[in-house]
Image: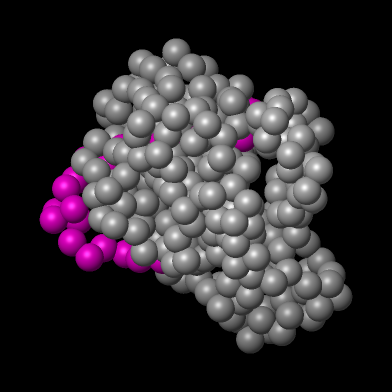
Amino acid sequence: MSKLKYLVWSGLRTMFRRGRRCPSCGSPDSAAVDRKWLVTSLRRCAGCRLLFRSPATSVGENERLYQERYSSGITTDLPGEDELRELLSGGFQGHPKDWRPYIEVLEFLGASPGERILDFGSSWGYGSWQLREAGYRVEAYEVSARRADFARERLRIPVHPKPDFLPGHYDIFFSAHVIEHVPSVAGLIETGLRALRPGGLFVAFTPNASSERFLNNNTSLHRLWGYVHPQLLDREFSEALPYTSLCAFSSPYDLDCLRAWNGRGRAIGRMDGPELLLVIRNVRTTEERGNGLKL
Ligand SMILES: [Zn+2]
């Protein structure tokens, strides 16, 4: 969407007071924490404490954006023949999509090769491929049909055509820089927990919007949100999550802290780095979870 179209769309929605409900918990109550161009604001939900952009996009608008228009450089652009060959033979070493740091975090969370991982929002499969190389049994889900086809055909990744996963089937439900884009954060977490076996881990990496991050450097919250980042996670949201077994930290990750957490209780640590890691352990069986929320 061009900036002009986005402003007109935002202006109309603001005028008719649409898109003001929290996209995650549905609460009508929120307070503005930042504004851009008069017609859009970043709001803090009074219920679940999520930071979300208003006007919020509808589920249909969101789907169209990621199916057709969303572009984010190397994350979404499909590599050419030679580039792909080079990336695979070098194992993505030194590339911005080198997932060694994520794989190391999984290790310190107690994950081990052979476990089943669902890579949610896999784009063209670069991360799924690296997880499989590290020995995990990987399945994926990607909303863009073009990128999902590439992952299936060129990297032999089993990519689900829809986000309906076998309940209780996975050891890890993984996403990297996806949760800030989905129609509902709570919906994604519940979908993930439902797909996990008891004791399985929901693991999400996302931009960190905690106030500590912006105290002593040039990055600002103002630059972080907009049309393609409709919501942001931070310390306040993590603290308000209603799960008994979770941890949340920012990068650079203190691996000993992760190991020490070991799925016991709630641990929320330093939050001054650029990326936020949220881990929730599934403490319920599929039967206890019932039909739950779905995406
Ligand atoms: Zn909310």
Q: In the rendered view, does 250 fall on the left or right side of 198?
A: right
Residue at 67%, 78% in the rendered image: 14
126 part of magenta stretch: no
Total marks in image: 0
Q: Is residue 281 magenta?
A: yes
92 displayed left or right of 162: right
From this view, report whether residue 228 is shown above or below residue 280. below
Quadrant of the rendered structure where residue 111 is? Answer: top left
Q: Which residues are magenta?
A: 272-295
Q: Quadrant of the C terminus?
A: bottom left
Q: Residue at x 59, y 47 (%)?
A: 155
Q: Nearer the viewer, residue 198 or 218?
A: 198
Q: Position of residue 5 (x, y in %)?
A: 81, 78
Can you say which quadrant of the picture contains the N terminus?
A: bottom right
Scheme of colours in the image: one colour
Question: From what the image shows, is residue 42 above or below residue 209?
Answer: below
Residue 248 at least partly seen: yes
Please state which of residues 35 and 109 is positioned toward the viewer in this rendering.
109
Picture coordinates of residue 72, whole percent (x, y): 75, 54
Vertical relation: 34 (above or below) 196:
below
Q: Is residue 239 visible?
A: no
Would you say 18 lies left or right of 168 here? Answer: right
Q: Residue 44 or 251: which is nearer the viewer?
A: 251
Q: Residue furthest left?
A: 287
Where residue 77 sits, quadrant-wise, is bottom right
Percent position of residue 235, x then y: 51, 38
Residue at (37% x, 51% y) in the render: 192
Q: Position of residue 261 (x, y in %)?
A: 35, 22
Residue found at x 63% / y 51%: 154
The residue lying toward the viewer, choosing from 94 and 88, is 88
